[in-house]
Image (cartoon, helix red, strand yellow):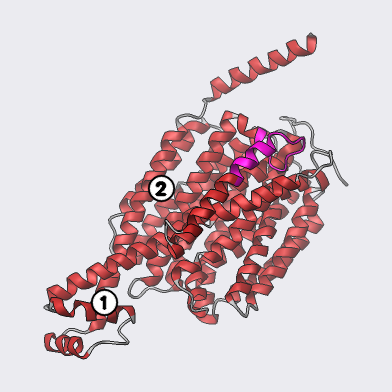
Amino acid sequence: MEHVDRVENKNVKITKEQWIQFIALVFGAFVAIEAMVFQAPAIPAIAQAFEIPTSLSGLIVVSFYVMSAAFYPVTGRLADQFGRRKIILIGMVIFAFSEYGAALSPTYSFLLSMRALQGIAVACIFPVVIAYIGVIFPPEKRGFASGIFNGFQGIASMTGAAVAGILITKYGWPIIYWVGGTLAVAGFFAIFFFVKESKGESKAGFDIPGIILIFIATACLISISTLVEVFGLTSSITLGAVVVGVSAAIALWFVENKVERPIMELSLLRNRIYTLIVIIYLINIAAMQLYIYTMNFFLSLRPGGDAAESGFFFFFVYFAGVIGGLIAGTLSDRVNNKRLLFTVLVFPFIALIINAQISYDISFTNVALIAFLFGIGSSVPILIKLGVNVIPPEKYGAGSGLLAFIRDFGVPFGSITGIVTFSSMSANATQSALVNNARTAGIDNDLMGDLQEAAMTNGETISTSLSEKLQSLGVSFEQLMLQASGEGITFAVNNLSYIGAGLFLLLIILTLFIPGPKKEKLKKTIHEKEEMVEQTN
């Protein structure tokens, strides 16, 4: 049975049937996020399996987020027109197929194509589930619902990373896709049996030029970090991607503001709160991913580190996020959201300042404590509530799709920047540390060239003169390289932590520009009176 969502009733009591729908929807999102998080600990293992450089491993992330971000507005609009439940079910089918396909990938390029399909699938699921929060819950209950939704996201992320780390260590990276595909099948049946259909806008029309421009802009702009690492900042390919991406984004703005039925609901950006929430959400996600992926490689590459340790790091980050999200979501229905958001953002800022002081030999206990402090500052439920509250009911899908689209620029930007910058910083710092440590050990300057050549082959090829010198000093090349590598990754993680702290400081400042509840209430009252006057005339 279908129903069209046109009005909101703040006095609606949430029934048992509605709660069952919401739980089924949350489970569907849980499945998608669980499988998505499986990916993070697997990236280093996949890079090794296909023998690709670290910089190109970022394509595993890029291929997914180019498609998910590009299709968020499309699937959101389709969900409003043709049925939200229907779009989620289609997403589950695509997700299961792409996960099983990825597990059987014969080549790296085939794996990337499956990751692209996974991105389309998640675009069918994630924003539409957020739209259902507006459909099922009145405004005064959406903070609590968003907290539950964020909590299950955190549980999926927490368990997914830890389980993936263990499974990869024992069975290899393909196992994560076999498990992810099976979970997607379970999610399909949960949505099919327990969720009712819901529609919004019924007007027909499809914005083909808008879809094409969204894809071009997204593909070019999200790929920039990887292109910089592979081809260089000033290469024609990188600069061409910037020019094409920016041009497509500008053209998209003009096209979407002129067509009658735009695929991207840019009119929502005229609302100050919505625009601020989108910007804060974007930067927040980017800063979170920068920290998470930086630590992922730090823990995997440091002496004695492995995928399991990285997986448990994710566990502590997201476990704290579950607790922090539930608290923040509950409080957002009771206290001033502006002050609450300001307070919550302080936690990750402090955590990153502390993280900027760590060394490669830090105990995992201390890493976990910092991760917990970072994760407890989960602001997502507050941002979801504030965003959904200003979206018209008939545009929940389109509005949630736009929110997810802009937000998801932050995921690849933060994660790819973390991977690429960490790789570049650590490599340069390792080379400098190797030379300095060699000089301290007593190696002559005329052997530094031989030393650097040995480093390029990871010690497989060492010149006779360098080998004799190392033996006379009682120092092995492996010892020098191990220490230099540790110092290199320490330099990278310290500097990237300062960058992340700067981003959270910016978020704290932006929070000050969100209108207070009294100002918003007055503005709403004035707007309602103006509408009454217009209707009278």
Amino acid type, label 1: Gln
Q: Is residue 152 visible?
A: no
Badge 1 crowding class, 10 Å Cα cut-off, few under 14, some 14 to 19, many 20 or more, is: some
Q: In which quarter of the view is residue 131 placed?
A: top right
Q: Residue at x 17, y 85 (%)?
A: 470
What's the residue at 57%, 50% (across, down)?
244
Query: Who is closer to the viewer here, 333 or 268?
Result: 268
* 230 shown above or below 213: below
Q: Nearer the viewer, residue 182 or 9?
A: 182
Tell us which disc is closer to us: 2 or 1: 1
Labelled disc at residue 113: none
User: Residue 452: which disc?
Assistant: 1
Q: Which residue is mark 2?
A: 348
Q: Quadrant of residue 330?
A: top right
Is residue 284 shown above or below 161?
above
- Can residue 157 be seen from the camera position used here? yes
Left or right of 211, for residue 225: left
Residue 311, x across and y down, in percent = 47, 67
Amino acid under label 2?
Pro
Residue furthest front as drawn? 236
Does residue 498 appear left or right of residue 191 in this picture?
left
Residue in the picture at 36% in, 50% down: 499
* 10 Å crowding of disc 2: few (<14), some (14-19), many (20+): many
Helix, strand or loop for disc 2? helix
The residue most toward the right is 1
**Which stretch is magenta?**
248-267
Q: How many circles with numbers are drawn on the protein? A: 2
